[in-house]
Image (spheres, rainbow, N blue to C red):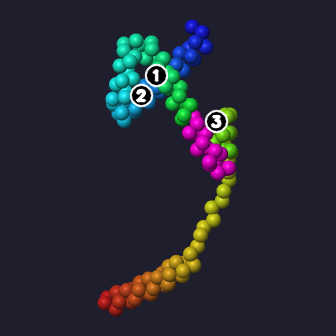
Amino acid sequence: MNTDTLIELLQKGYRVTLGAASSAVEAVQDPQRAADDFSEVGTDFYRLADKLEVRGALTEKEARDFVEGVVSQMPEPFRSVSSSFSQAAPPAPTTVTTVATPVIDTELQAEVESLTTELIAIRKEIEELRQQNN
């Protein structure tokens, strides 16, 4: 089997599936119109497949236009990143070395020191009371 015909077959299958999904959504929204459209096709499956393929190609184009419209409205840094992913292979990952520096809250540190001093005083007092009882 020729690879070109295989690719065309897969592409046609994709578009027919996309067209069928689009038609199903339309059938839920307007059942009478969908029934009329499909009753005119009858049992001619080749004609149905062609109709679904055309509808799928249109849906695919609309989806591409929508995505391109959204990308064009994105701020520049995001647009350049998204376009570089769609055009070429993703860039090689880079290693970034960072150094963590502790953040010291001076109020919290002073409170901890005060509580530590108070705890030391309480322990000494407990020890003195124990010695007096013995």
Please report whichever mark, 2 or 3, sits nearer to the chain's N-terminal start.
2
Towards the viewer: 87 or 98 = 87
Disc 3 designates what residue? Answer: 86
Which amino acid, by three-letter code, is at mark 2?
A: Ser
Instruction: Indicate yes or no whether the magenta region holds residue 100.
Output: no
Q: Nearer the viewer, mark 2 or mark 3?
A: 2
Label 3 amino acid?
Ser
Q: Is residue 48 above or below residue 56?
A: above
Residue at point 34%, 25% (across, down): 35
- Are circles 1 and 2 on residues that touch, CB within 8 Å? yes
Quick check: is 78 in the magenta stretch? yes
Residue at 46% in and 26% down: 19
In the rendered image, the residue lying farthest to the bottom is 132
CA gap, disc 2 and disc 3: 29 Å
| Type of amino acid under label 1 | Leu
Of residue 105 and residue 64, the one placed in the foreground of this image is 64
- Horizontal side, residue 62 vs residue 98: left or right: left
Residue 122 drawn at (x, y percent): 41, 86
Which secondary structure lies at badge 3?
helix
